[in-house]
Image (tube, helix red, strand yellow):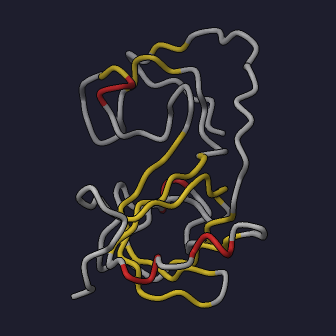
Amino acid sequence: MDSTIRQGEISVDLPPAEDAWLRFIGRIHTPWTDRKDCPRQGRPDGPECRVEVFEPWVAALQGLDAFATVELLYWLDRSRRDLVVQNPAHSDKTHGTFALRSPVRPNPIGTSRVKLERIEGNTLVVRGLDCLDGTPLVDIKPDRCAYTPVAPPKG
């Protein structure tokens, strides 16, 4: 975790965390091992990344292959959590944390809508991610659909 404070940033002392009882259901594998190399936001034509799903959650993938895009929620486990005002490296202004898509958040939950290339056993092969290799997976959801679980055909 980078503990550097940029000019204009404000950090707070955090109280002890309450346990939310999150269960990591898998692990994300990407080409990026350093935050500075990560794309700022994923791109649909980005590199193939692999989303490994752990047992007993593999059976929950049934039917997901009907969707062209899925949403991934993941835990940004290497992000600091104490900044309330940030000075992004690409900007000369400061912003409140909730006005940014920065991984630095009080609860570092990341989200990406990714292109589902294929499913190989317990692994989703996707494009469009923007997180570090080894990031814990929190949840998978089909892309938004009307009031029915039936997915539109791919294509």
On the image, the x and y values in percent for residue 142 come to 40, 65
In this picture, residue 42 sits left or right of residue 27: left
In the picture, residue 98 is in which quadrant? Answer: top left
**101 sits left or right of 123 in the view:** left
Residue nearer the viewer, 93 or 55: 55
Q: Establish if 90 lies above or below 105.
A: below
Out of 29 and 18, give the one closest to the viewer. Answer: 18
Could you say where residue 33 lies in the image, as x and y percent from the top left? 62, 64
> How many discs mark residues in the rendered view?
0
Q: Residue at x 36, y 27 (%)?
A: 87
Residue at the image position 34 percent from the left and 20 percent from the top: 96
Residue at screen point 35% across, 76% down: 115
Tell which of 88 and 131 is nearer to you. 131
Image quadrant where one finds the N terminus:
top right
In percent of width and height, residue 79 lies at 60, 39
| In the rendered image, the vertical position of residue 72 relative to residue 52, given as above or below | above
Name the quadrant containing residue 126.
Answer: bottom left
Q: Give the quarter of the figure containing the C terminus.
A: bottom left
- Establish if 62 lies above or below 82: below
* Residue name at image x 48 percent, y 62 percent: 37
Rendered location of residue 21, percent (x, y): 74, 35
